[in-house]
Image: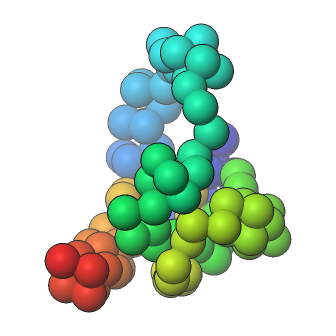
């Protein structure tokens, strides 16, 4: 986990993250029953995808395929962060989210 998801995080954040890990989602079965995202159901929301360029858990190439296959993403932003951007690059993530909020509010 340290080398794939938390490689840019401090040792303290890694320890905290490890203490919060669950084996799987409590709502996994509920998610399976949901209809897939579609323009009809979510088209009124401006979807912006933030690529984490140093993410070793979801590689940028796979992130790009998710963006392409989704079809609802209006904009793609990139930050230099690992998978846990809220811990490894909180200022950059916050600035990125503020830009998105300002643009689409």
Quadrant where the C terminus is found in the figure: bottom left
Q: Is residue 93 visible?
A: yes
In the image, 67 versus 15, the foreground residue is 67
| Number of marks present in the image shown | 0
On screen, residue 59 above or below 81: above
Question: What residue sits 48% from the left and 31% below the top?
Answer: 18
Residue at image coords 57%, 67%:
72
- Residue 21: % across, % down: 49, 25
Q: Quadrant of the N terminus?
A: top right
Residue at image location 27% in from the left, 80% down from the top: 104
Q: Is residue 28 visible?
A: no
Q: Position of residue 23 (x, y in %)?
A: 59, 16
Q: How is the image coloured?
A: rainbow
Of residues 19 and 48, the one nearer the viewer is 48
Left or right of 48? Residue 7 is right
Question: Foreground: 29 or 42?
Answer: 42
Residue drawn where x is 76% and y is 62% of the image = 69
37 vs 50: above or below: above
Q: Is residue 103 left or right of residue 6?
A: left
Q: Is residue 85 left or right of residue 52?
A: left
- Position in image of residue 25 (x %, y %): 53, 20
Where residue 34 appears, as percent x and y from the top left, is: 56, 26
Quadrant of residue 68 within the rendered picture: bottom right
Q: Residue furthest front?
A: 40
Left-right relation of 61 to 72: right
């Amino acid at each position: 986990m340290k080398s794939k998801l938390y490689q840019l995080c401090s040792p303290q954040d890694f320890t905290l993250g490890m203490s919060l890990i669950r084996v799987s989602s409590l709502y996994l079965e509920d998610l399976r029953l949901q209809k897939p995202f579609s323009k009809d159901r979510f088209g009124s929301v401006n979807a912006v995808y933030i690529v984490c360029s140093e993410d070793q858990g979801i590689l940028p190439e796979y992130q790009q395929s998710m963006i392409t296959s989704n079809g609802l993403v209006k904009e793609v932003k990139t930050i230099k962060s690992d998978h846990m951007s809220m811990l490894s690059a909180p200022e950059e993530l916050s600035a990125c989210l503020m830009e998105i909020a300002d643009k689409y509010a």
